[in-house]
C-alpha cells in the first residue's frame, strides 16, 4: 500500500452512488477500510522503473507491486497490465478468480 493507492481507495469510498445497494453503512465501510489499512504492508515507491502502461493512471499500481515485492498483481484489467512485462520481475498478473484458484485453493 502507498499513499497514492490509499487516497484512491478513500475517494472511491466517498462515492455514495457506488454504495447505494451496499449492506454496510458509511461508518462500517470506513471501519472496514481502516482495518484493511492496518494489515497492509506500506511501501515507499521510488519510481525507479516506469512500465509505461497503456493507461498512465495504472503505472503507480505496477510500481507499488514491484516495490512491495508482490508475487502477483491482481486486477480485472489484465489486458492493460501486459503480463509479459511483469514476468521479468517474477510477478504474475492475475484476475481475482485466477488469484483465488492459484493461491487460495
Image (spheres, rainbow, N blue to C red):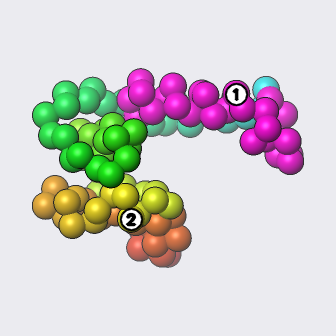
Quadrant in which residue 42 is drawn: top left
Q: Which mark is residue 67?
A: none
- Residue, disc 2: 79
Q: Quadrant of the N terminus?
A: top left
- The tag earlier along the polypeptide, 1 or 2, is 1
Instruction: Give left or right: position of 76 versus 25.
Output: left
Q: Residue at x 32, y 51 (%)?
A: 54
Q: Nearer the viewer, residue 105 or 82?
A: 82
The image shows residue 46 at horizontal and vertical percentages of: 19, 28
Label 2 near label 1: C-beta < 8 Å?
Answer: no
Q: Which residues are magenta?
A: 1-26
The image shows residue 95 at horizontal and vertical percentages of: 47, 66
Q: Secondary structure at mark 2?
A: helix
- Residue, disc 1: 14
Give the vertical position of 40 relative to 83 (above or below).
above
Give the vertical position of 54 relative to 43 (above or below).
below
The image shows residue 21 at horizontal and vertical percentages of: 86, 47
Q: Is residue 61 visible?
A: no
Would residue 90 be counted in the magenta stretch? no
| Image depth: mark 1 or mark 2 in front | 2
- Disc count in the image? 2
Q: Is residue 59 visible?
A: yes
Q: Residue at x 28, y 65 (%)?
A: 83
Amino acid at each position: 500500500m502507498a499513499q497514492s493507492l490509499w487516497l484512491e481507495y478513500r475517494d472511491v469510498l466517498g462515492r455514495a452512488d457506488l454504495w447505494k445497494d451496499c449492506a454496510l453503512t458509511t461508518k462500517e465501510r470506513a471501519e472496514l477500510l481502516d482495518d484493511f489499512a492496518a494489515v497492509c504492508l506500506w511501501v515507499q515507491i521510488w519510481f525507479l522503473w516506469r512500465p509505461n502502461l497503456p493507461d498512465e493512471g495504472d503505472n503507480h499500481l505496477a510500481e507499488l507491486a514491484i516495490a512491495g515485492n508482490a508475487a502477483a498483481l491482481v486486477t480485472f484489467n489484465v489486458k492493460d497490465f501486459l503480463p509479459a512485462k511483469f514476468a521479468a520481475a517474477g510477478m504474475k498478473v492475475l484476475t481475482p478468480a485466477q488469484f483465488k484458484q492459484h493461491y487460495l485453493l
